[in-house]
Amino acid sequence: GEDVEQSLFLSVREGDSSVINCTYTDSSSTYLYWYKQEPGAGLQLLTYIFSNMDMKQDQRLTVLLNKKDKHLSLRIADTQTGDSAIYFCAENGGYQKVTFGTGTKLQVIP
Amino acid sequence: GAVVSQHPSRVICKSGTSVKIECRSLDFQATTMFWYRQFPKKSLMLMATSNEGSKATYEQGVEKDKFLINHASLTLSTLTVTSAHPEDSSFYICSARGAGQQNQPQHFGDGTRLSIL
């Protein structure tokens, strides 16, 4: 079945850039997503990229997709304390089912 | 943007009680709704996919008699945890998708934290 992997934890200083990485196995993925989850809350869609794109930038967020290596990354520029959360990547490879990664907990140190 | 409302946000009840969680799409018609369960510090586990007007499709290992799903209208799906026990305590999250949006992102509710004493 599909598998999506992320590192569990990332710690950065406020003002630095954060890079969260994700690898997936389903080569038929059409869309790949990044979600943010704050403690006790649901998931907030941050951004998504279509599989025929290499990069997408949206304000402080930059998504890079290496389809050959099945590698997705999310870069957050000028990371703020409010960015502290768990970040999930997810891929949509089938008709309805989305597979989520294990989540990366981002800690921003003031 | 699309809004999904989930209610209640938190439930604490005694063992043996049945608990109903509602998931509503507020500004779009959700032909498909998804129910997830999230254990502490873990990823989301898809429990079932519910299409309006038809029976839900449950993932392997999820007891359909334990977790009853009803998607009777295009804006409402409910998950009922029947005869809940402490091991059912978890964070339950719903998401929704509109017609013709198979590749579009799902829109998530804020989740329901269920605690069974």
Image: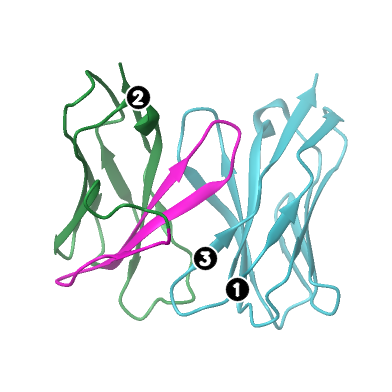
Instruction: From the image, state the color of chain B.
Output: green
Given the image, what chain letter belongs to the residue carrying mark 1?
A
Asked if residue B108 shows in the view, the reply is: yes
Query: Could you tell me what secondary structure mostly forms the magenta stretch?
Result: strand
Query: Hey, which quadrant is residue A93 in on the image?
Result: bottom right
Does B30 sit above or below residue B16?
below
The x, y position of residue B5, in whole percent, is 28, 44
Are labels 3 and 2 assigned to the same chain?
no
Asked if residue B1 shows in the view, the reply is: no
Disc assigned to residue B86? 2
Of residues B50 and A39, which is closer to you in this image? B50
Residue at screen point 85% across, 31% down = A12
Q: CA distance from mark 3 to mark 2?
A: 28 Å
Of residues A41 and B68, which is closer to you in this image? B68
Comparing labels 1 and 3, the label whose residue is closer to the camera? 3
Disc 1 element: strand
Does B21 sit above or below residue A98?
above
Task: Specify the farthest residue to the left.
Answer: B72
